[in-house]
Image (cartoon, helix red, strand yellow):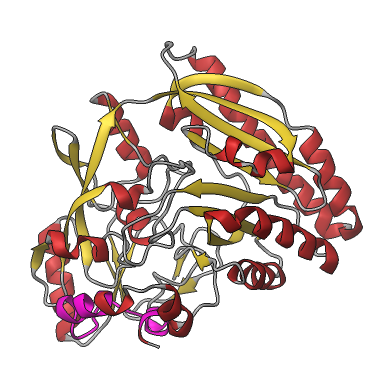
């Protein structure tokens, strides 16, 4: 039995195959295609949507890890490498990826395929850093993705083939001065905060007036001592644990949720630390949840956040997690939620073990009305009808899919609904 990280998605594949190299991937795909079975690649299981769910063949890529080569400003890495492993390997070479992601447990291929992002107003997601890809197509052939197909493959949802290697643009290792503080929500939503830093985000609890802001900028000074960095990062862990405790208490006494949220905001500490980007930005989840996230046109972000907070209050939903708000530039990936427009991201969370649908449905309604597009790795209700309206390059994506996987080896019922109607 396979389950994702949150426990919200599970399936019983007929077979789980863990190939040790690309030849093993090719053999597994050919065997499944010959048996008229479907194949779904499986990464770290951090997607909340059913992208990896299958009753046929689950292809576990956890053995395909490591950096293959580094040439100039390009690094080629195997698909199953986690972002933590990638960050560490690049740091040893004095390098880093520009698309800063604050969760490092997903695999490179999984993060790229779903459009996973950080909060950098001028630098795109990890998908945007892709300069080349190698994959196994529906016939079992190994393919170097041509440039003309790269914008389809860079957010491919695992629908074009099984990615075995990803080539990424890299940069010299980045030292950041990271800070955190409380600030009024109106200030956090202002462009002169979110757009003013190399990296910036904030979270805001329903029923609270202030936001919990975190931002970072490039620094010339040397990294702080490891103890100072550990203390700074541990504050996020402690806050996450406090949120988890508040969620548990809120389940037992729902009327306390507004008070708990206001207290959690008030107790958030301030401070700064300087170190390599991946050391100060990474968050360590200590509680589990279900999540939905929506990509809004940047100009609609402030209104969308305010309306969602008001709607949660009006419906008196017991929401113990904060909304998480981030930003990013327009992307070129045909199915990337930020395709063609500067974007504001709004994520909502519901504790595992509770019914997430009231909150997730409300977020879909409110943020969808602001032209929001769902993050592919998060929970959402969209089908082909909404996707076709929101993504002008969907027909081009389907053309490439027909070429790379004409027999639809790489699909499941979720992808059938989203891509084929």
At x 18%, y 65%, the residue is 149
| Location of residue 316 in the rendering, given as x and y in whole percent from the top left corner | 85, 65
Q: Is residue 345 above or below residue 96?
A: below
Q: Is residue 391 above or below residue 79?
A: below
| Location of residue 296 in the rendering, given as x and y in whole percent from the top left corner | 54, 60
Q: Which residues are magenta?
A: 397-419
Pick the quarter of the image with the N terminus.
bottom left
Q: Main secondary structure of the magenta part?
A: helix
* Viewer-closest of 234 and 18: 234
| Location of residue 96 in the rendering, given as x and y in whole percent from the top left corner | 31, 32
Q: Residue 327 in magenta? A: no
Number of numbered labels in the structure image? 0
Q: Is residue 200 left or right of residue 171?
A: right
At x 9%, y 65%, the residue is 142
* Viewer-closest of 28 and 264: 264
Pick the quarter of the image with the C terminus.
bottom left
Q: Residue 399 in magenta? A: yes
Quarter occupied by residue 92: top left
Q: Is residue 401 above or below residue 204?
A: below
């Amino acid at each position: 039995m396979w389950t994702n990280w949150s426990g919200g998605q599970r399936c019983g594949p007929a077979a789980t195959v863990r190939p040790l190299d690309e030849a093993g991937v090719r053999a597994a795909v050919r065997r499944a295609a010959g048996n008229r079975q479907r194949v779904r690649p499986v990464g770290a299981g951090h997607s909340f949507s059913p992208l990896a769910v299958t009753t046929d063949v689950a292809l576990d890529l956890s053995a395909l890890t490591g950096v293959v080569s580094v040439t100039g400003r390009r690094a080629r890495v195997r698909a199953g490498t986690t972002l933590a492993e990638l960050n560490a390997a690049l740091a040893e070479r004095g390098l880093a990826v520009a698309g800063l992601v604050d969760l490092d447990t997903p695999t490179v291929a999984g993060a790229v395929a779903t459009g996973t992002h950080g909060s950098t107003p001028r630098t795109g997601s990890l998908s945007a850093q892709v300069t080349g890809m190698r994959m196994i197509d529906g016939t079992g052939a190994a393919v170097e993705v041509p440039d003309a197909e790269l914008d389809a493959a860079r957010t491919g949802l695992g629908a074009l083939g099984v990615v075995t290697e990803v080539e990424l643009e890299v940069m010299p290792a980045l030292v950041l001065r990271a800070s955190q503080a409380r600030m009024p929500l109106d200030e956090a939503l202002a462009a002169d905060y979110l757009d003013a830093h190399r990296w910036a985000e904030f979270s805001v609890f329903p029923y609270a007036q202030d936001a919990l802001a975190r931002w970072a900028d490039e620094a010339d000074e040397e990294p702080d001592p490891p103890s100072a960095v550990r203390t700074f990062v541990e504050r996020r862990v402690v806050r996450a644990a406090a949120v988890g405790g508040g969620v548990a208490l809120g389940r037992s006494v729902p009327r306390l949720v507004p008070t708990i949220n206001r207290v959690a905001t008030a107790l958030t500490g301030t401070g700064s630390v300087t170190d390599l980007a991946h050391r100060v930005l990474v968050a360590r989840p200590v509680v589990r949840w279900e999540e939905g996230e929506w990509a809004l046109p940047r100009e609609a972000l402030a209104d969308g956040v305010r309306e969602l907070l008001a709607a949660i209050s009006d419906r008196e939903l017991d929401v113990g997690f904060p909304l998480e708000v981030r930003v990013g530039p327009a992307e070129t990936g045909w199915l990337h939620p930020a395709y063609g427009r500067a974007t504001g991201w709004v994520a909502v969370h519901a504790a595992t073990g509770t019914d997430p649908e009231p909150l997730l449905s409300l977020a879909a309604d409110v943020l969808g009305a602001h032209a929001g597009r769902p993050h592919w790795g998060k929970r959402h209700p969209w089908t082909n009808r909404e996707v076709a309206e929101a993504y002008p390059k969907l027909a081009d994506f389907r053309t490439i899919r027909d070429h790379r996987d004409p027999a639809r080896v790489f699909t499941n019922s979720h992808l059938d609904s989203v891509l084929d109607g």
